[in-house]
Image (spheres, rainbow, N blue to C red):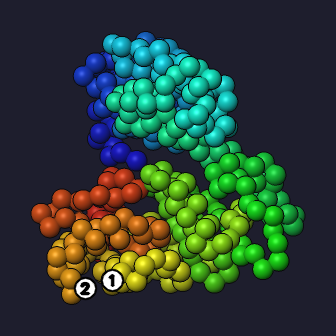
Amino acid sequence: MLPLELEKEYYQALIDRKTEYEGVFFVGVKTTGVFCRPTCPARKPKWENCEFFETAEEALLASFRPCKRCRPLSHPDLVSEIVSVLVDAVEKEPEKRWKDEDLQRFSVDPSTARRQFKKRFGMTFVEYARARRMGLAFRHIRNGHSVIDTQISTGYESSSGFRDAFSSIMGTPPGLQENCNVLKASWMDTRLGPMVAAADDEALYLLEFVQRRGLEREIERLRQKTKSAIIPGSTAIISSLEVELDKYFEGTLTEFKTPVKLLGSPFQKQVWEALQKIPYGETLSYAEMAASLGKPTAYRAVARANGANQIAVILPCHRVINSNGELGGYGGGIPRKKWMIQHERKSLQK
Ligand SMILES: [Zn+2]
């Protein structure tokens, strides 16, 4: 979510078809489901139907598809044939798990495709296809929500449509054998965008923004580490988390009580435990954190351990910043980090 001021600036640039905003933002049009570049020749959407993104990947993950008229995934002055062929191919089979090998079908050299995609949009072809697939899958889940609620109340845990959509993100769960661990995963809407949570009956294992880079890999690692099947559903832990998250985003909760399970190396766990001691509304630098662990030179390792945190918001890695006051990195995106730091400060002042 971008600041309102910035969205207004982008909307004006969209209306004026300003070429200097090319590549700066993309606009998703809720009524048509497509996303466009600022200079799209099509009729301009109303303000309330626009959603603004700073990268094409974010637009894809929000389940928008590229506009056929302005082709937001092509460079305005140089429409790459390879790119447009591949984007069209993905649109024909968006649910497919595209791999580099598939490029042979189109007589496209994988390294050329990789270079062209990367240069123009900062992601490879495979990453593009994955973002599109996840966006669609998540939309199915979102649309399925009311269906699921009905089915839970009538005794079914989830609809098969929901299950299909979920498996396309989580991978197909292995056959449920005896002694197989099961983690339930649930989707939740927050004011900073959708999040996904995974938990068993005892603890929370994962909480991430759906748009977090590398989420799919993270889920795969979780599955391997815990030797679990991850299936859609809820547990008492997830219900408690939902209540707590709502309160956090309202500004009325400063400390989470939902139990978490830390899966990492001894050093990572040390860092994550230190994270939990940073008070609400305060920040610490990576260097200060390293010093507090008795390893003053290990600030890079501390930053990496922060990046490997799988329980966003609750393990507040958003409260760790650079020594010079800059925000540093954040898997869920810098605007979310900034928002949470300011939100916590403001809530304390109230
Ligand atoms: Zn367009």
3D distance between C-alphas at marks 2 and 1 = 8 Å
The percent coordinates of residue 344 (x first, y second) are: 32, 69
Mark toward the viewer: 2 or 1: 2
Classed neighbour count for the residue bearing mark 2: other residues with Cα under 10 Å, few (<14), some (14–19), many (≥20) = some
Image coordinates of residue 163 in percent, x first then y, are 76, 54
Decide if residue 240 is in sight here.
Answer: no
Q: Quadrant of residue 116?
A: top left
From the Cβ of disc 2, is ligand 1 less than 8 Å away? no
Q: Position of residue 157 (x, y in %)?
A: 80, 64
Q: Amino acid at mark 1?
A: Ala
Q: Which mark is residue 243?
A: none
Q: Is residue 270 visible?
A: yes
Residue 289 shown left or right of residue 207 in the figure? left
Residue at 54% of width from left, 25% of height from top?
A: 87
Horizontal side of 17 relative to 33 (left or right) equals left
**Residue 316 percent coordinates (x, y):** 37, 72
For the residue pair 207 and 120, the one nearer the viewer reads as: 120
Disc 2: which residue: 293
291 sits to left or right of 317: left
User: Can you tell which mark lies on residue 274?
Assistant: 1
Give the SS element for disc 1: helix
Q: Is residue 215 above or below residue 22?
A: below
Residue 140: quadrant of the picture: top right
Q: Closer to the N terminus: mark 2 or mark 1?
A: 1
In terms of secondary structure, where does tag 2 sit? loop
Front-most of residues 116 and 345: 116
Whether residue 326 is situated above or below residue 27 in the rendered picture? below
Q: Which residue: 55% across, 54% down?
A: 216
Image quadrant where residue 291 sits = bottom left
Which residue is found at the position 66% from the left and 77% from the top? 200
The residue located at (57%, 67%) in the rendering is 222
